């Protein structure tokens, strides 16, 4: 029963992410989280520990494509830029989700 509940939660998060990308276009992880929380009037909370593994699974399944590069907005203490992924639908269009 616990595995089924976990599968449902993961599937729900995937649908929320894909819907957010459909409406708003390419976004990085923090912006996806902010969009989901803002759209739901903060009724839904998306934690980093759930979002980033979900994004990784979705990319492995071909449901989205991530493009990694430096960002000017996020700096580490060593003054190096941290890479930030921008996530969107794959270039060949929306995959069949089934």
Image (cartoon, grey):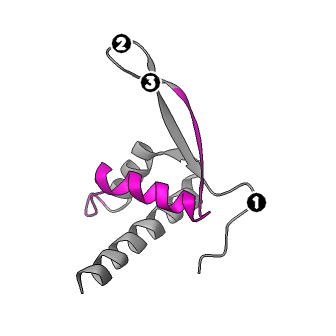
What's the magenta region?
A: 41-70
Q: Is residue 23 left or right of residue 96?
A: left
What SS does tag 1 mark?
Answer: loop
Callout 1: 10 Å neighbours few (<14), some, many (20+)? few
Residue annotated with mark 1: 92
Note whether 5 is above or below 40 in the view shown.
below
Is residue 48 rendered magenta in the image? yes
Q: CA distance from mark 2 to mark 1?
A: 38 Å
Is residue 56 rendered magenta in the image? yes
Note whether 12 is above or below 28 in the view shown.
below
Callout 2: 10 Å neighbours few (<14), some, many (20+)? few
Q: Is there a contact, CB below 8 Å, between mark 1 and mark 3?
A: no
Residue 78 is tagged as 2
Residue annotated with mark 3: 73
Closer to us: 45 or 82: 82
Could you tell me which residue is drawn at 52 percent across and 40 percent down?
85
User: Where in the figure is residue 46, as x and y percent of width and height?
Assistant: 31, 56
For marks 2 and 1, the one nearer the N-term is 2
Q: Is residue 71 left or right of residue 13?
A: right
Q: Is residue 3 left or right of residue 90?
A: left
Callout 3: 10 Å neighbours few (<14), some, many (20+)? few
Q: Quadrant of the N terminus?
A: bottom left
User: Where in the figure is residue 4, as x and y percent of width and height?
Assistant: 31, 83
User: Where in the figure is residue 18, as x and y percent of width and height?
Assistant: 53, 63
What SS does tag 3 mark?
Answer: strand
Closer to us: 18 or 23: 18
Q: Quadrant of the C terminus?
A: bottom right
């Amino acid at each position: 029963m616990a595995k089924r509940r976990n599968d449902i939660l993961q599937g729900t998060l995937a649908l929320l992410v894909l819907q957010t990308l459909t409406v708003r276009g390419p976004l990085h992880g923090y912006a996806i989280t902010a969009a989901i929380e803002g759209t739901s009037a903060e009724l839904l909370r998306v934690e980093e520990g759930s979002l980033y593994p979900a994004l990784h699974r979705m990319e492995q399944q071909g449901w989205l494509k991530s493009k990694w590069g430096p960002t000017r907005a996020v700096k580490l203490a060593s003054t190096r830029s941290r890479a930030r992924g921008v996530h969107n639908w794959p270039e060949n269009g929306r995959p069949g989700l089934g």
